[in-house]
Image: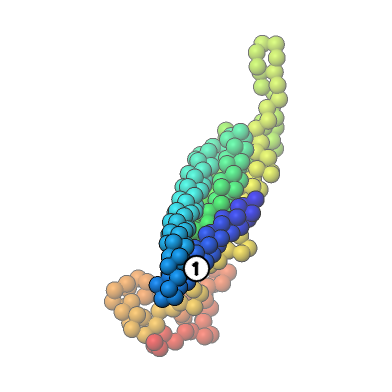
Amino acid sequence: MNVVNRFRRSWGTYTLTTIAGLAFAFGLLCLYEGVFGDKADWLPAASSSIAICGTMVALHSQARKDKVDRSRFYLDSALKSFKQATDMLSDNNDRVRWIAGARMLVRSHEIAESITEREHLAVLEINLDELRHTLGKILGSRDNTKTGAFFYGTANHNVSLDQAARSATAEQEIDSHHSMSRHDSIPEDVLYTIYSFAKFPDNYREPIASDQRFRGKEWRFLRFKYPGLFQYISHTDQHISLGGELHPNPKPPDRNGT
């Protein structure tokens, strides 16, 4: 549907531009014939055509402004919704909140798909990079304290997985005569949805050029301005760290060139 809407908007802009161009060309022709061709009866047509051209230009300008405003609205709405989703997921392991947070991520992404302007898309990508890191931390990336028991919804994350699993479905007393089984564990489809937003997509465009290196004047300047950085780069030039062991770098880079 988003593709169809974008096509319709683009086609509308193309139509306005075409009509304006044709009206302007016809207006010039009528004006030329009216002034230089002794065809005074063509002058009203020239005036009307140029007026139509002006109207089309104004409509085109307004359409362009509306397009930018719509894109900005979708950007602002998507960023706000992504923030609401991470707030919903942070600092808790409540099953209901995590389901709601995953749904909010999906709907935020649907809103973001309607963004059309290149500058707005660049701002979105900056925020998506931050979102990926935030969601990675929420899922426990490089965090040994967020154990498997956490995702069973237990208050104590340090219990065994067996104990956490039992606790997730333990009977909960409603009143003196009734009880019901708890359902605290976070579903895998919810976890996968959050994970899919935390990972970098296969078609991710890396904005950092991989061939950038300190060389020549910049390399010599680094020694005095940023001594710690100079020491680090110099050390990586001479050594390769693998499996907790240091090995000589067989091909240290030449940094004396330009």
Q: Position of residue 239 (x, y in %)?
A: 49, 78
Determine whether 251 is above or below 5 in the image. Answer: below
How are the residues colored?
A: rainbow
Q: Quadrant of residue 233?
A: bottom left
Whether residue 157 can be seen here? no
Q: Position of residue 176 (x, y in %)?
A: 66, 11
Please identify the residue farthest to the left as the structure is shown: 224
Q: Position of residue 139 (x, y in %)?
A: 58, 47
**Is 180 left, or right, of 222 in this rendering?**
right
Determine whether 42 is above or below 218 in the image. Answer: above
Please identify the residue farthest to the top as the structure is shown: 176
**Is 98 left, or right, of 171 in this rendering?**
left
**Label 1, on which residue?**
26
Q: Quadrant of the C terminus?
A: bottom left
Q: Residue at x 52, y 59 (%)?
A: 16
Q: Position of residue 177 (x, y in %)?
A: 70, 11
Q: Residue at x 57, y 41 (%)?
A: 104
Q: Nearer the viewer, residue 8 or 160?
A: 8
User: Which kind of residue does numbered mark 1 sit on?
Assistant: Phe
Determine whether 175 is above or below 55 in the image. Answer: above
Q: Nearer the viewer, residue 213 or 3?
A: 3
Q: Nearer the viewer, residue 150 or 55?
A: 55
Whether residue 106 can be seen here? yes
Q: Residue at x 61, y 33 (%)?
A: 96
Q: Nearer the viewer, residue 136 or 108?
A: 108
Q: SS class of the residue under badge 1? A: helix
Q: Residue at x 49, y 73 (%)?
A: 209
Count up the numbered dots. 1
